[in-house]
Every structure is written in C-alpha cells, then in structure tokens.
Image (tube, rainbow, N blue to C red):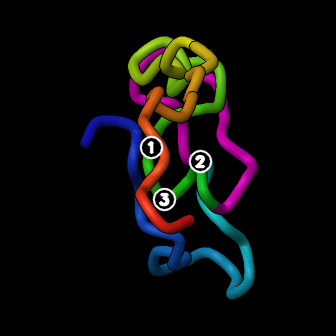
Amino acid sequence: MPGLEPDAAPEGEPDGVRRTVRCGLCGRPLTGAGSRRTGLGPACDAKLHPAGPDIPVRRREPEQDTLPGM
C-alpha cells in the first residue's frame, strides 16, 4: 500500500526512532496504531468506508387468533 513504511529504524538511524507513515490517500502523517496499520487516517477511512444509514426497524407481533385452551 502506498504510504506504508516499516516501523523498524533503517541502518544508520538510532533504535527507537519510528519512521513517519503517511496516509495513502491524503499524505498526512499517521499517528494512531490502527491508522498506521491500515495506511489510512480516520477521515480518509470514513470517506472510503462510510457508515451505513441509521434506519430504525419496527418489529411488531403479527395478529393471530388465540390458541384453543389458552
């Protein structure tokens, strides 16, 4: 994926220094672990994977005759 770079420090750089991972869509630096893992920032991820519509579902009991003996 574009924008993903390894977290390990390359040769010649001190240990513990993480390379900058940039968003594959907009190029901004990623800071969160989940964003670094997917390669997309939260705003770009929301653009590519929008939340589904919030449609309430009404459930009702069907009208039935009572059972004999009850």
Residue drawn at point x = 42 percent, y = 35 percent: 64
Q: Is residue 44 magenta?
A: no
Determine which residue is flagged by label 3. Answer: 37
Q: CA distance from mark 2 to mark 1?
A: 6 Å
Of the pair 9 and 27, the residue shown nearer to us: 27
Up-down relation of residue 47 to residue 66 (above or below): above
In three-dimensional space, the C-alpha distance between marks 2 and 3, rounded to whole angstroms, equals: 5 Å
Relative to residue 18, is residue 28 depicted above or below?
Answer: above
Of the 4 image quadrants, the one containing the C terminus is: bottom right
52 relative to 42, above or below: above
Q: Rounded to the nearest whole Å, what is the CA distance between mark 1 and mark 3?
A: 6 Å
Three-letter residue code for mark 3: Arg
Residue contact at pointers 1 and 3, CB within 8 angstroms: yes
Instruction: Please state the extent of the stretch shown in magenta in the rendering.
Output: 21-33
- Residue for point 53% across, 71% down: 7
| Residue 17 screen position, x and y as percent | 72, 72
Disc 2 secondary structure class: helix
Q: Residue at x 59, y 47 (%)?
A: 35
Query: What residue is drawn where x is 57% and y is 28%?
Result: 60
> Type of residue at label 1?
Gly
Q: Residue furthest left?
A: 1
How many C-alpha atoms fall within 10 Å of the one at disc 2: few (<14), some, or many (≥20)? some
Secondary structure, mark 3, is helix
Q: Which mark is residue 63?
A: none
Mark 2 and 3 residues: CB-CB less than 8 Å, in contact? yes
Up/down of 18 relative to 60, above or below: below
List the residue tagged with mark 1.
Answer: 39
Q: Secondary structure at mark 1?
A: loop
Residue corresponding to mark 2: 35
- Quadrant hosting residue 1: top left
Q: Amino acid at mark 2?
A: Ser
